[in-house]
Each structure stands twice: as C-alpha cells, then as structure tokens.
Amino acid sequence: MSSHFHKLPAKTWFITGTDTEIGKTYSTTRLLTALNAANMPANGYKPVASGAAMTTLGIKNPDAFGHLQASFDDLAYEAINPYFFEAEEAPHILAHHEERPIEFSVMTEGLRALEARNRITLVEGAGGWYTPLSFETSFSDWVIENQLPVIVVVGLKLGVINHARLTFDAIENAGLIISGWIANHLSDSPSLKNYITGIQAFSDVPLIGEIPYQASMKAESDTYFDLSIFK
C-alpha cells in the first residue's frame, strides 16, 4: 500500500543545448551508450522532432532514430518520438501549418510510459532552452511543469561562454536543478579548452562530460563522461 505514497523520484533528466546544431543528439546518444555499457540501463526520449531521413524503419527523424538505437529497451519508434514533423523547420511553425498542435499532456504521457520501465530516461529537447512549441508555450514550460533536472550540452565555439551563462541563468531562475554540463568540441581548434576554463570560471555547474571532435560512437563513449550523477 505504502508504495503509492513513497514513490521514488524518477530517474529522468532533460537535455538542452546552448543553441541549435551544437551536438545535442550527438551527445545524448553517446551518453545513452555510456550508461548502458556501464550497466545503468537508459532509454532516450525525443518528444518533439522535425526533419526526416530514410532509416531501417522508413522515413523517420534521424535524431529520434539515434535515440531508439542507443536505448536499452526494444521500443517502438512512437514511444520515443510522439511528435514527428518531416519538414526541416521550427516545430511550432510546423505544428501551426499542419494544424497539429503539440500538447504537453501527450509529451508527459509518453514520458510516464518510459519512466514506468524504471530505467534512466534522457529527454532531449529541440534547439535551445526557450525553443517554442506553439505561439504561447516554450519547451522550457514543459520542463518546468515536470520539474526535471537539466543537463546542458555546450557546443564549444566562439561566443559560447556567453551562451552557456545565459542558459545556466535561465534554467536556475526557473527554479530547476542543473545536474551538469557536457562540453562538445565542434572543431579541432586548440582554443576550445580555453572556453571550458572560461565557463568554469563563471559557474559552479559541474562539467560531467567532454566529447572530442568527431568522437567515435561506441569505442570510447564510456570514457567521455562522469556518470556519478546518475547513481
């Protein structure tokens, strides 16, 4: 009886980025691979995705398909990606044009179904923290509604210290916990290390992973991350 009243906190994290096209999916799928290799079963969830490519399942979103392949459980594509738009455009614009509104309740229902499996669940957003899902709501509103701890993928490039600090501030001002950030090298420039140092100088958010430029998918994934926050 008491289990209904002492529900363990869900092992769920929301993954956002400092911008779009900075390696959020790249980082998330590597983190899923590392967790599963470390005997810490983890599934991915990409509730809203736009853009299509041919996969072994037909035309699907390649990012969500990457989650599917890296997840611990054998899941249906729809379990990982309830809102799939084929065009390459901002989700709120496509939802408006296609008259297919993105509903928080559907996103949350999908998340609860994955959480019921009692795995670690990594929920990847779309774009940055304030990406709109309609002309009234942002992805951040859904994360706040669900009170998810956040991991920030920081794409290392010129201007990233500003982007990282703005993102950290926005999440913390929403009253959410930032469990850590991942530094993703977007080039082989030696100056990228200085950006990591710069972010650490202005923030006490822990660096939990560093992914080298064009990192391999499986071979060294488990060495890129400090997985202690997931234990």
Image (spheres, grey):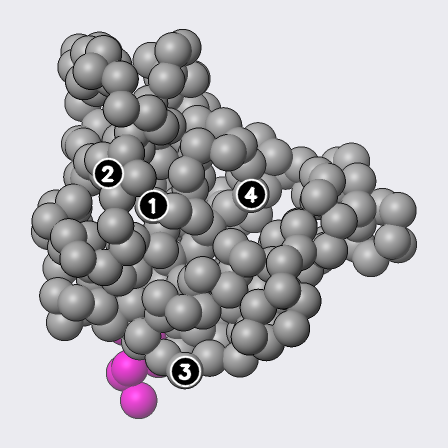
**Quick check: 191 above or below 70?**
above
Residue 128 visible to an observer of this rendering:
no
Q: Which mark is residue 211?
A: 2
Q: Residue at the location (75% across, 36% down)?
A: 136
Q: Is residue 146 left or right of residue 137?
A: left
Residue 135 location in percent, x, y? 78, 36
- SS class, disc 1: helix
Quarter placement of the N terminus = bottom left
Which mark is first along the chain, 2 or 1? 1
Q: Which mark is residue 27?
A: 1
> Which residue type carries mark 2?
Ile
Residue in front for this viewpoint, 88 or 145: 88
- SS class, disc 2: strand
Q: Which mark is residue 126?
A: 4
Mark in the foreground, 2 or 3: 2
**Quick check: 171 above or below 61?**
above
Q: Residue at the location (45% across, 61% down)?
A: 66
Which mark is first along the chain, 4 or 2? 4
Kindly check if marks 1 and 2 are in contact, taking CB atoms under 8 A apart as contact.
yes
